[in-house]
Image: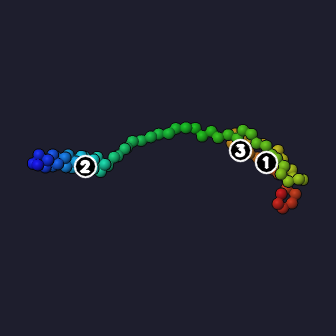
């Protein structure tokens, strides 16, 4: 009987130690510090554009473009075109 009480006491002491280690592991702050640098080149280009006629009688015109701009004009006949 006395031997069983000692084994139970040792078991609970081991459990308490494991709980203390687990708590201290998860209760600490984990800090990551550092720097990062990103380099790159902004190179967005307009490579192809076409005009389509949606409303009959309107002139969609011919667009002109460079690598970073578009110019176009359209002839609209009435409101809603």
Q: In the image, residue 75 lies at what x, y percent?
A: 85, 53
Quadrant for the C terminus in the image: bottom right
Query: Given the current orientation, which residue lies at the most extreme bottom position?
Result: 79
What residue sits 14% from the left and 47% below the top? 4
Q: Is residue 61 above or below residue 39?
A: below
4 left or right of 24 in image: left
The residue tagged with tag 2: helix, strand or loop? helix
12 left or right of 29 in image: left
Say which residue label 3 marks: 69
Query: Given the current orientation, which residue lies at the most extreme right position?
Result: 57
Say which residue label 2 marks: 19
Q: Is residue 13 visible?
A: no
Residue 36 in which image quadrant: top left
The residue tagged with tag 3: helix, strand or loop? loop
Q: In the image, residue 42 lies at what x, y percent?
A: 60, 40
- Which is nearer the eye, 65 or 27? 27
Q: How dense is the environment of label 2, judged by Cα within 10 Å: few (below 14), some, or many (20 and up)?
A: few
- The earlier-in-sequence mark between 2 and 3 is 2
Q: Pointer 3 and pointer 1: residues touching (CB < 8 Å)?
A: no
| Colouring convention used in this rendered image of the protein | rainbow
- Which is nearer the eye, 64 or 33? 33
Q: In the image, residue 45 lies at what x, y percent?
A: 67, 40
Q: CA distance from mark 2 to mark 3?
A: 66 Å
Say which residue label 1 marks: 72
The residue tagged with tag 1: helix, strand or loop? loop
What residue sits 88% from the left and 53% below the top? 56
Foreground: disc 2 or disc 1 = 2
Q: CA distance from mark 2 to mark 1?
A: 73 Å
Q: CA distance from mark 3 to mark 1?
A: 10 Å
What residue sits 85% from the left and 56% below the top? 76
């Amino acid at each position: 009987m006395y031997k069983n009480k000692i084994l139970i006491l040792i078991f609970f002491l081991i459990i308490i130690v494991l709980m203390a280690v687990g708590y201290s592991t998860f209760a600490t702050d984990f800090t990551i510090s550092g720097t990062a640098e990103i380099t790159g080149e902004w190179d967005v280009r307009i490579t192809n554009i076409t005009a389509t006629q949606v409303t009959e009688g309107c002139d969609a015109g011919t667009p002109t473009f460079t690598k970073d701009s578009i110019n176009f004009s359209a002839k609209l006949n009435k409101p809603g075109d």
